[in-house]
Image (cartoon, helix red, strand yellow):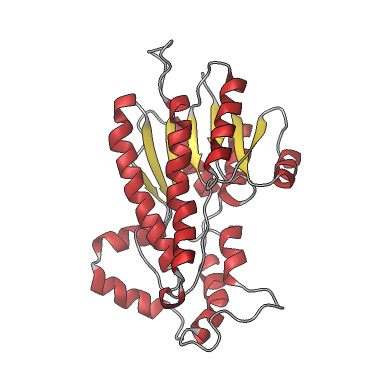
Amino acid sequence: MNKNIVITGVSSGFGLATATDLLARGYRVFGSVRKTADAKKVSDQLPSSGFTPLLFDVTDHAAIAEAVGQLTTQLNGEGIAGLVNNAGVGPMGPLEHTSIQQLRDVFEVNVVGVLAVTQAFLPLLKRSEHSPDATAGRIVNISSTSGGVTFPMVGAYSASKYALESLTDGFRREFARYGIRVIAIEPGSIRTPIWDKNATPAADEPQPFAGTAYEKLMAQLPAFFEQRLKGAKPISAVTEAIVHALETPNPRARYPLDSTWYAGKYLGDRLMDAIIKRQMPKG
């Protein structure tokens, strides 16, 4: 059985946790990192016999192609059982003060990067021409509850995740011809470094958006997120969903891991506006 898995963004968070879980289940994990130092750090944390770092940034198309070539040679005719598109960024800030370049940067990682990586690794996911009865690989995209509900101060991130949801639908419906299953995972409130490093500025940094109408609200966000994270699900909820998506004979198209996702789908815009307004800090 082919148990080769590619995961983007394994330096921390969902990527590192997923790599750890899959290695324990006997998979061979090929994980992307952006820096040589990160490759060493992750390799030191994971069993070296089962983990291989791939050095590329999802925005660097030449580096992606080089990694695919490296992996193709290493697999020597084998394909991959799964591609987990996990790498992402989660900036915070009001849309009024989000620069066009900042928005482009978010989409470049969270949307364009997913397309670039998927296109590049697609040949390794397809059924081998030499083994037409072999099972095709699967694609698991790490989306977010923010791909179904937009909260204030994360509009750019949310827009990119809505786009990723649509991209996932396109992949699923187009790649069915190859037997490739495509699944989205939508985590909710789960503590990962992507939020920790954005929610609280360093002590020597100026408060974000000082002097704007959002200064008070932004100052209250760290405490707001801390409160929400008190009832957060463990990161294992995400890794278990990924494993299920990779292994079950009939995976769901989506795995929403927070009830907020369903609320956003069924309660209507005006009611959700009122609910979100009550939940957010008064800033």
Q: Is 89 left, or right, of 46 in this rendering?
A: left
State the residue at coordinates (41%, 68%).
155
Q: Is residue 81 above or below residue 207?
A: above
Task: Name the spot of residue 105 as percent of width and height, x first.
Answer: 49, 59
Instruction: Indicate the quadrant where residue 266 lies.
Output: bottom left
Whether residue 23 is visible, yes or no, is yes
Considering every residue shown, the one lying at the far top of the view is 130
State the residue at coordinates (60%, 38%).
31
Q: Is 24 left, or right, of 283 in this rendering?
A: right
State the residue at coordinates (35%, 63%).
149
State the residue at coordinates (60%, 51%).
13
Instruction: Indicate the quadrant where residue 277 lies.
Output: bottom left
Viewer-proximal residue among 19 and 73: 73
Q: Is 37 left, or right, of 65 in this rendering?
A: right
Q: Is 17 left, or right, of 224 in this rendering?
A: right
Whether residue 26 is visible, yes or no, is no
Q: Is residue 118 above or below residue 166?
A: above
Viewer-proximal residue among 139 and 189: 139
Q: Report the label total.
A: 0
Considering every residue shown, the one lying at the far front of the view is 62
Task: Name the spot of residue 62 as percent of width and height, x first.
Answer: 55, 39
Task: Name the spot of residue 275 as percent of width and height, x first.
Answer: 33, 75
Task: Name the spot of residue 163 as percent of width and height, x first.
Answer: 36, 54
Viewer-proximal residue among 175 and 119: 119
